[in-house]
Amino acid sequence: MHRAGPENPFTPLVALGVIARHQGLAESAEHFQRALEQWDAAWRARWQTPAGLLENKAKALLCLGKKEEALQTLAQAIAQMQPGDTIELDNWELLRTAPAPPVGVEEAIAMLKEAQARRG
């Protein structure tokens, strides 16, 4: 679960970045950069589950060209999944089908699908 609202800019900024990237808009990088600036506060406040926060951080990192760090962060997200956490591929698919998909998005989707299969 996550709380939405002005006190929680991290998740909405990642979502804005995904949409902007899917639409081919240059400001997507700014949204992802601003989201990462909110990372520490989001983590401390637990605005989402640890897995959810880490997955969103992985999206931002990947879209900022930090493939290795993004894939490591996504692996951490998968490792921290608890019962009740779900794997949503929609935003990853939006990134995959963007005019300029981030390098590593196919690997990220494969990791998530494998985790989904393991969870049943």
Image (cartoon, grey):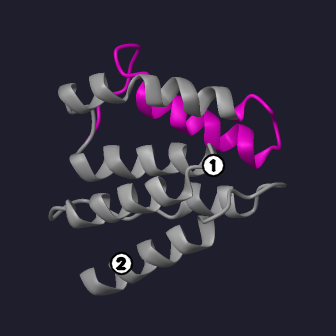
The answer to whether 113 appears left or right of 24 in the picture is: left
**Residue 15 seen anywhere in this rendered image of the structure:** yes
Q: Which one is nearer the viewer's eye here, 17 or 88?
A: 17
In percent of the image, x 65 and y 26: which residue is there? 30
Of residues 93 and 58, which is closer to you in this image?
A: 58
Q: Residue 120, can we see it? A: no
Q: Secondary structure at mark 1?
A: loop
Magenta region: which residues?
A: 1-28
Residue found 42% across the figure and 28% down from its top: 10
The residue under label 2 is 116
Q: Which residue is mark 1?
A: 65
Q: Quadrant of the N terminus?
A: top left
Amino acid under disc 1: Gly
Q: Position of residue 2 (x, y in %)?
A: 29, 36
Q: Is residue 28 above or below residue 116?
A: above
Give whichever of discs 2 and 1 has the lower sequence position: 1
Give the residue displayed 61% in from the left and 65% down from the top: 105
Label 2: state its secondary structure: helix
- 4 drawn magenta: yes
Q: Amino acid at mark 2?
A: Gln
**Residue at horizontal 43 percent and vertical 22 percent from the top:** 9
Give left or right: position of 59 versus 42.
right
